[in-house]
């Protein structure tokens, strides 16, 4: 065990260099740039060390085009004896840079014991850590059982349809093929993320009738109808959701209840393009659309989540003559939570204790990540997120990953491999 821990420490320089090389490829999503390049980097590195490498393009998936092909790479190293397969899955895409940086977002600079850049924390540092941990383990324990897989996948930041969802549909996460999945998302090195809340996105539309704005009584204002909807939400729906608590250990604490965000609202004349110097015209809005983002708990049923909103709309309708509306589903994800006594959870928990001398905290993510596809499409339940990045730094300016955090998380990953495949 000590030799394995030392071996990871010895490889710190290599871990930093690999993280820097990954950060320097600007895999921005949208639109999905340089995906092939980053897959080649991972594939060439592991292929050169005897891993079998598969490049998979998610042809025809949401977001895939000849201009921006959705490339994924899956690398597999077979042991010398039969056994289980441990799979590390990282997404290789990063979100937009945004404002407020004091470092080069794609420079991969090493300073203050950190590697800086967009994606360093979320989650190229995690990808590099899993690669170095697996290489160190395979070097010291060449006679291991089973197999190790490492994948770098597309589009997690935009739903994962050209990445893990596609691979799951192709059978890559079939429980007959893969038994343990660790996703090195940035959830802090001493926490194990068991899953995430559910999501329902929908559009609510209120309908009216257009008329001249000087005689609004001849029309029917869709925006006033929507105002009544929001008023009803404030009086009944928001208090109801705030009172609904979950037993899931969601972090941060504020997300340990049902939540509803009003993402966008639009009614009446479209916003004019920049440079338009005229005035608006006088019309009664005949349409108002509200986009909602409802996050729900393992204890809630999605059908009940939807009918609660319909019931609220019906209350508004009963009180307002001429009120007409429509609700359109946009997107939904079921909550996912791996059991605390699942083998991968117990293994990583034990490894955190050995490396850091304290027990790992169990958490659940407020938002979703690729575990949803592994669970729902792949039907694989033995899956967690565990990685070196600090959650709060994801998507922020001056994003970084701590070198010591990567070393320690790498030790946890290598020890976990030893437990499962040694
Ligand atoms: Zn991520």
Image (cartoon, rainbow, N blue to C red):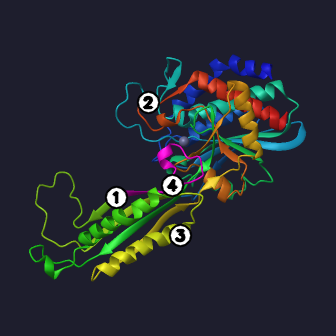
- Residue that lies at the very extreme toward the left in this rendered image: 214
State yes or no: discs 1 and 3 in contact (Cβ < 8 Å). no
Tell me the crowding category of disc 3: few under 14, some 14 to 19, or many 20 or more residues within 10 angstroms, Cα based.
Answer: few
2 or 1: mark nearer the eye: 1
- Does residue 321 show up? yes
Tell me the crowding category of disc 4: few under 14, some 14 to 19, or many 20 or more residues within 10 angstroms, Cα based.
Answer: some
User: Residue at left 44%, top 65%?
Assistant: 202
- Which badge, 4 or 3, is on the more N-terminal residue? 4
Q: Does the residue labelled 1 lie within 8 Å of ligand 1?
A: no
Q: In this view, does 162 lie above or below 212?
A: above
The dot on residue 129 is none
Residue 398, percent across and down? 43, 29
Res 228 quadrant in image? bottom left
- Which badge, 1 or 3, is on the more N-terminal residue? 1
- Which badge, 2 or 1, is on the more N-terminal residue? 2
Magenta span has 260?
A: yes
Q: Name the residue under label 1.
A: 264
User: Residue at left 37%, top 76%?
Assistant: 315
Q: Mark 3 points at which residue?
A: 304
**Separation of residues labelled 1 and 3 (CA atoms):** 23 Å
Q: Name the residue under label 2.
A: 105
Q: Mark 4 points at which residue?
A: 63
């Amino acid at each position: 065990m000590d030799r394995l821990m030392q071996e990871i420490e010895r490889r710190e320089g290599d871990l930093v260099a690999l993280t820097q090389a990954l950060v320097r490829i600007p895999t921005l999503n949208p639109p999905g740039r340089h995906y092939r390049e980053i897959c080649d980097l991972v594939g060439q590195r592991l292929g050169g060390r005897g891993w079998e490498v598969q490049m998979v393009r998610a042809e025809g998936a949401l977001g895939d085009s000849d201009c921006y092909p959705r490339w994924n790479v899956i690398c597999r190293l077979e042991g010398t004896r039969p056994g289980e397969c441990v799979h590390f899955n990282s997404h290789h895409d990063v979100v937009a840079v945004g404002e407020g940086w004091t470092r080069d977002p794609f420079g991969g600079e090493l300073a203050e014991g950190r590697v800086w850049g967009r994606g360093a924390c979320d989650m190229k540092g995690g990808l590099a850590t899993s690669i170095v941990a697996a290489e160190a383990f395979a070097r010291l324990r060449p006679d291991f059982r089973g197999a190790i897989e490492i994948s770098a996948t597309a589009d997690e930041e935009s739903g994962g349809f050209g990445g893990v969802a596609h691979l799951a549909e192709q059978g890559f996460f079939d429980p007959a093929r893969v038994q343990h999945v660790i996703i090195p998302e940035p959830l802090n090195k001493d926490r194990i993320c068991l899953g995430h809340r559910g999501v329902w996105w929908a559009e609510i539309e209120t309908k009216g009738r257009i008329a001249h704005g000087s005689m609004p009584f001849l029309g029917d204002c869709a925006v006033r109808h929507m105002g009544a909807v929001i008023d009803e939400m404030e009086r009944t729906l928001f208090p109801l959701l705030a009172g609904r608590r979950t037993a899931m250990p969601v972090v941060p604490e504020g997300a340990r209840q049902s939540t509803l965000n009003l993402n966008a609202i639009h009614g009446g004349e479209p916003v004019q393009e920049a440079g338009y110097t005229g005035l608006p015209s006088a019309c009664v809005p005949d349409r108002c659309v509200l986009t909602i983002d409802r996050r729900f708990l393992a204890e809630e049923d999605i059908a009940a989540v939807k009918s609660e909103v319909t019931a609220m709309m019906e209350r508004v309708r009963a009180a307002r003559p001429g009120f007409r509306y429509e609700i359109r589903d946009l997107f939904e994800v079921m909550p996912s939570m791996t059991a605390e006594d699942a083998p991968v959870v117990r293994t990583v928990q034990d490894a955190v204790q050995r490396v850091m001398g304290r027990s790992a905290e169990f958490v659940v993510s407020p938002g979703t990540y690729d575990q949803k596809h592994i669970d729902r499409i792949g039907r694989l339940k033995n899956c967690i997120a565990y990685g070196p990045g600090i959650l709060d730094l994801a998507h922020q300016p001056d994003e970084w990953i701590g070198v010591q955090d990567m070393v320690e998380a790498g030790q946890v990953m290598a020890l976990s491999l030893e437990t499962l495949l040694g």
